[in-house]
Image (cartoon, grey):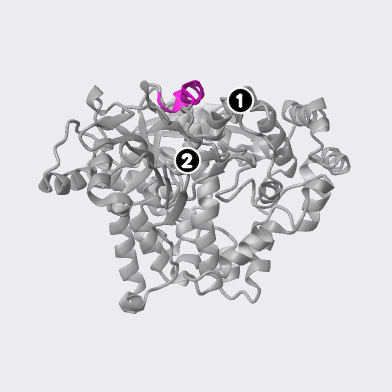
Amino acid sequence: MCGICGEVSRDGVEASVVAVVKMTAALEPRGPDAGGMVGRGRAVLGHRRLKIIDLSEAAEQPMVDSELGLTIVYNGALYNYRELRGELEAKGYRFFSSGDTEVLVKGYHAWGERLVERCAGMFAFALLERDTGRLVLARDRLGIKPLYFTDDGSRFRFASSLPALLAPADTPVDLDPIALHHYLTFHAVVPAPRTIVSAIRKLPPATVLTLGRDGSRREWRYWELRVGPHEEDARYSFEDWQEVTLEALRRAVRRRLVADVPVGVLLSGGLDSSLVVALLAEAGHSPQTFSIGFDSVDGESGNEFAYSDAIARRFSTNHHRISVEARRVLNSLPACIRAMSEPMVSHDAVGFYLLSEDVAPHVKVVQSGQGADEIFAGYHWYPALLDSADAVADYARAFFDRDHAEVERVLHPDLVGEDHSRALVVQHFGEAGAARVVDKALRIDTSVMLVEDPVKRLDNMTMAWGLEARVPFLDHELVNVAARIPAEYKVLGGGKRVLKEAARRVVPAAVIDRPKGYFPVPALKRLRGPYLDLVRDVLGSAKCRQRQLFRPAYVSDMLTVPDAHLTPLRGSKLWQLALLELWLQTHGI
């Protein structure tokens, strides 16, 4: 797990070492253990390292293989690297390290860009061919590892975070109006390739980008999620799917133990993280587990310790209960926002940030239950979509924070155009690979909304403290299995039905049958006292007024009755505006 960056000149001028030094420095929290750079005239690559697999200096990056003429910078974990190494050794390749980075180098030489189709894990890498000058970038199937870039025609830069691309201070910072529309509609989600900053883009998941010495650029997608049963799946009963699901999850959890350091678990006490702990125990592992809780507000509980404590006792884990006072949440907000590659409005961003701060001194790797709600249909809007007669309207009613008419009331008139967000859903729902309405919703939630909210949040907040988070529910083979299960087996019975019934073999019923919980930070939902003061200050600041992003009348109405403006997902619309402005100010935009 690391941070990567680089610059490639496209006009014959040497790449800027200074720019890459600044980008590398900005990525230091992602890789506090070591750093390095390699320059070759028109190309300079930078790296920050978090030592997880092969702790020796033989695995340092950028990794140069002079014999093959390849240089790589890589962020992630390749869980099947030993199997791939065996295949490569059988082909005659010799290795000088024992980790996964070199496997990617040799694998690329052996199989070219198709290497990515053999990889099981999370990754973002950039690989430079010495002899051709070609740069190849790739990102894992579910976008677990981030990769941003900017291309002005004369130079191409990439980095693991958006702020790293701002570090050289010469990147244009104009805002993207379409991205703003998405941010205000999709609970702060801005689907790839866009970001809030027009000049900065992100490589979509499951995508390979190649940049030729002549300036040519090509992208191709190597994996597509198809949702709905396959023809041969008709023979599977509900009980069969339980067995298939549990076995796929067992394999995913075991894979994510591949490390040369201990692996812990972020234990919320919900079904998903409890299932991870149970399967680790079944495999003979008793990890350290970590739970976090916050002060209650207006009777809304800020913790689920009763459930996480029960799981810790049941499976005899070395458990850490972390209680966070409201004052610590407020004091941590500036640093949390600084750690965001993009503005993330979800209240639990600061929860993961604070949890990671306290977990990092104990372990360097954790498994998390993120992703199960999307792939196994755990959200409340899926049942209504089983028999939907108007797919887009029903999905929008349940998921959108605002409709287009309200976005027009929020933004300055110069920033509002068409209903870009609804158009994106229409386009996505119209693509092949998902026939039923509920399957279309599951596909967009898994391939877009999950990637750009929970997954990104987990990566940003854990990596801010040099902590690697692994997500077994996003094992691509498990995702493919879940996508094939008939929707009724997932949606009915309160959601995640097949997963719940499979879990009964290993998890106590009290955890499975409990009401659905979330990762609550009530103070950012029910804005009071110093939190409300912060929101008033930032939205009333000179910088905010000069930016002319939001219409004053809309902001004034929201500030008059802060609690009256919640989204369908129960988030604060007021906090959403303030968070965007705070993020822009934090990063000098």
Q: Is residue 51 left or right of residue 419?
A: left
Q: Describe residue 74's horizontal placement relative to residue 84 as left or right.
A: right
Q: Residue 318 or 341: which is nearer the viewer?
A: 341
The amino acid sitting under disc 2 is Leu
Name which residue type carries label 1. Ala
In terms of secondary structure, where does tag 1 sit?
Answer: loop
Residue beneath disc 1: 169
Q: Is residue 287 visible?
A: no
Nearest the viewer among 12 and 484 is: 12
Residue 331: quarter of image: top right
Q: Which residue is mark 2?
A: 147
Instruction: Check the image and report above or below for 60 versus 491.
Output: above
- N-terminal of the pair, mark 2 or mark 1, is 2
Q: Judge depth for marks 2 and 1 and give the one in front.
A: 1
Residue 253 lies within the magenta run: no
In the rendered structure, the answer to whether residue 148 lies left or right of residue 94 reads right
Instruction: Tell me the quarter of the image containing the C terminus.
Output: top right
The residue at the point 64 percent across, 57 percent down is: 399
Q: Quadrant of residue 97?
A: top left
- Of the pair 126 and 147, the residue shown nearer to us: 126
Q: Is the stretch drawn in magenta largely helix, strand or loop?
A: helix
Q: Is residue 485 above or below residue 458?
A: below
Give whichever of 258, 416 is nearer the camera: 416
Q: Which mark is residue 393?
A: none
- Circles 2, 1 touching at the beta carbon (< 8 Å): no
**Crowdedness near tag 1: few (<14), some (14–19) or many (≥20) residues, C-alpha within 10 Å:** few
19 part of magenta stretch: yes
Magenta span of residues: 16-31
Q: Position of residue 29 (x, y in %)?
A: 46, 24
Q: Position of residue 193 (x, y in %)?
A: 55, 49
Q: What's the residue at 63%, 60% (across, down)?
A: 424
Q: Residues within 10 Å of mark 2 (few under 14, many from 20)?
A: many
